[in-house]
Amino acid sequence: MALAVILFVLTYILLLALPKYRAYVALVSAILFIGTGIISPVKAVEGIDWNVLMMITGTMGTVYLFCQSRMPEKMADVILERMPDVKWVIVSLALFAGIISAFVDNVATVLMVAPIALTVAKRLKISPIPIIIAIAVSSNLQGAATLVGDTTAIMMGSQAGMDFIDFFFFHGRPSMFWFTEVGAIVSGFILLWQFRDKNEKVTDVLNTEVNDYVPSILLFGTVLLLIVASFINPKPKITNGLICISIMLIGIVFEGIKNHGLIDSFRETFGSIDFFTLLLLASLFMVIAGIKEAGVIDSLAALFVRLSGNSLILIYSLILWGSVLISAFIDNIPYVATMLPVVAGIASYMQIDPTLLYFGLLSGATLGGNLTPIGASANITGIGILRKNGYEPSTQDFMKISVPFTLSAVTSAYILIWVFWS
């Protein structure tokens, strides 16, 4: 376990310090976890979330076709002509991403909205870095709003016996949707304050003509099918990935037939996929599987139990704020999977309704990933998009936006959950 902790800490220090080489740092770390015997090659590969990788790959391809259709430029026109200045453009894009993310995976949301942000930034002659960072953190926030917003929400809903409607009202009381939306409003004001100096007037609003509506229909179909799939149980673990890959292939074939060049369509679309980000995520999944195999995550969960004692406010605070801190560096899916039964055990021992602790866990784990560039897949994806377009955001660039945003959203949720559920 000591070796696993040392490797893990060193890996994340290097990931933060060497953003241009993150994929290679993570890959070397995964190889070391296997080579030192912490985890077997089979278990390391099993730790990779192939559903997420397939979903990202498929959505990247569909989004490329979406961009080629000039629909992002058209949507940028609509946003620009309705916003008075640049700061409102940034906030509106972040809120727009948040709304989508309440119903669609956070990574898919970033992949869909980022092209619009890039187009807007190009029109306004400003850097897209702060816009895409705001989009990523807003997407992570709204993942806790509904049962289908994020994998962690699905897991918590299953543990608590909640269905889609229960995320709005549960046992006659306000549920996660409202706590998340209040956090979104509060953090929206934080974004307005952060970008208060960007008062440049919006100019150069065009009337772009869309040359192909099929990619837009396919992208909407992806959203719709992902929502529908969330209600189907049981289903294969790679269902969402298969949906995204299948729709991308449909788009490639359609474009190939339309332009009389199926091979060229395949080559161009696959050339648009960010394999650097995919390698980074795959390697991180193996590293996380390694520390879980070594018992590190289990030990962290046990630490909560020892530190909490019998004070409800202390237990609740430790779970929520501890989850924020841990999820800033550890993928929140294995962490939440480990902590859910621990939370249930604490509630049983104290003979209380576990809902308060479940909501605290979900809020902390979902939002904590916003603190660092590598704390959530949506953040990694957003930075990957910037990198692919020639921008290199630093850790400082990211945390200058993410830390105030996250703390404001978490604090409001922390207070409201306690008020309604303690």
Image: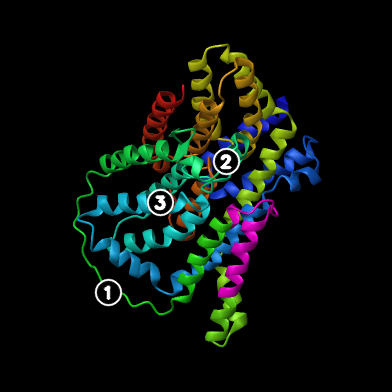
Q: Residues within 10 Å of mark 3 (few under 14, many from 20)?
A: many
Q: Is residue 421 above or below residue 198?
A: above
Residue position for label 1: 207
Residue position for label 2: 152
The region drawn magenta spans: 229-251
Marks 3 and 1: which is nearer the front? 3
Q: CA distance from mark 2 to mark 1?
A: 41 Å
Residue position for label 3: 99
Residue 418 in picture, x, y percent from top left: 43, 24
Q: Quadrant of the N terminus?
A: top right
Residue 393 in picture, x, y percent from top left: 43, 48
Q: Is residue 212 magenta?
A: no
Which of the numbered marks, if any, corresponds to residue 83? none
Residue type indicated by callout 2:
Thr
Q: CA distance from mark 3 to mark 1?
A: 25 Å
Q: Is residue 310 above or below residue 304?
A: above
